[in-house]
């Protein structure tokens, strides 16, 4: 019985399940790009560019080494669509709430590198001139966070919204940014 208990405690300490080193509030900004898989399908328009610029702000609370909750807002700009022979810019806003699950890495890099998965829900709102649409869809993704200093971390992430817009057009984002821990 003592061996089983000792083995369990060793596993907890190796995988960092009992550590609160990363727990707490954080906020950050990201920049990158968003890609629409089939162009932008709003009002039966054709897309002249499938990629737009992305700016994201977010805040979250990490509950320890494994779980975090996060809310954020992303703005996607410079996606051009052809409406009646003229090019127009699309403006898209994404509000998201997600849970993050971190993979405990039993290596020397554990204190510096975190790999995580994201699953959540997003509310998207897009507009071309006076025509707009909105939709709620799930969001999932994968990312890595490099803890540069105890209060500063850099991260890179790929996210996917499989049901974006009124015509089930998938949206994929790629972003890099910085988090500040409080």
Image: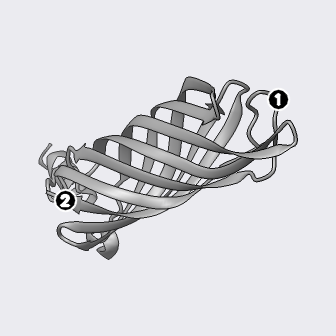
Q: Read off the residue under disc 2.
A: 181
Report if residue 107 is visible in the image. no
The image quadrant of residue 44 is: top right
> What whole-number distance in Å separates the C-alpha atoms at marks 2 and 1?
44 Å
Report if residue 42 is visible in the image. yes
Q: Residue at x 86, y 36 (%)?
A: 84
Q: Secondary structure at mark 1?
A: loop
x, y percent for residue 86? 82, 44
x, y percent for residue 5? 15, 46
Quarter of the image with the C terminus in it: bottom left
x, y percent for residue 90? 64, 42
Q: Residue at x 81, y 35 (%)?
A: 45
x, y percent for residue 35? 67, 51
Q: Secondary structure at mark 2?
A: strand
Q: Is residue 153 left or right of residue 138?
A: left
- Mark 2 or 1, which is nearer the eye? 1
Quarter of the image with the N terminus in it: top left
Name the foreground residue: 131 vs 119. 131
């Amino acid at each position: 019985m003592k061996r089983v208990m000792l083995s369990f405690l060793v596993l907890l300490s190796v995988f960092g399940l009992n550590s609160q080193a990363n727990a707490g509030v954080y906020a950050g900004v990201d920049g990158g790009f968003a890609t629409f898989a089939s162009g932008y399908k709003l009002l039966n328009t054709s897309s002249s560019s499938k990629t737009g610029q992305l700016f994201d702000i977010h805040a979250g609370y990490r509950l320890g080494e494994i779980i975090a909750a996060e809310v954020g807002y992303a703005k996607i700009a410079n996606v051009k669509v052809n409406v009646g022979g003229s090019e127009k810019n699309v403006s898209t806003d994404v509000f998201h709430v997600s849970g993050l699950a971190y993979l405990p890495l039993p290596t020397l890099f554990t204190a510096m590198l975190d790999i995580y998965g994201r699953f959540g829900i997003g509310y998207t709102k897009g507009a071309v001139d006076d025509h707009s649409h909105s939709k709620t869809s799930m969001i999932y993704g994968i990312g890595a966070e490099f803890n540069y200093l105890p209060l500063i971390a850099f991260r890179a992430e790929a996210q996917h919204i499989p049901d974006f817009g009124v015509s089930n057009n998938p949206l994929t984002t790629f972003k890099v940014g910085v988090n500040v821990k409080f």
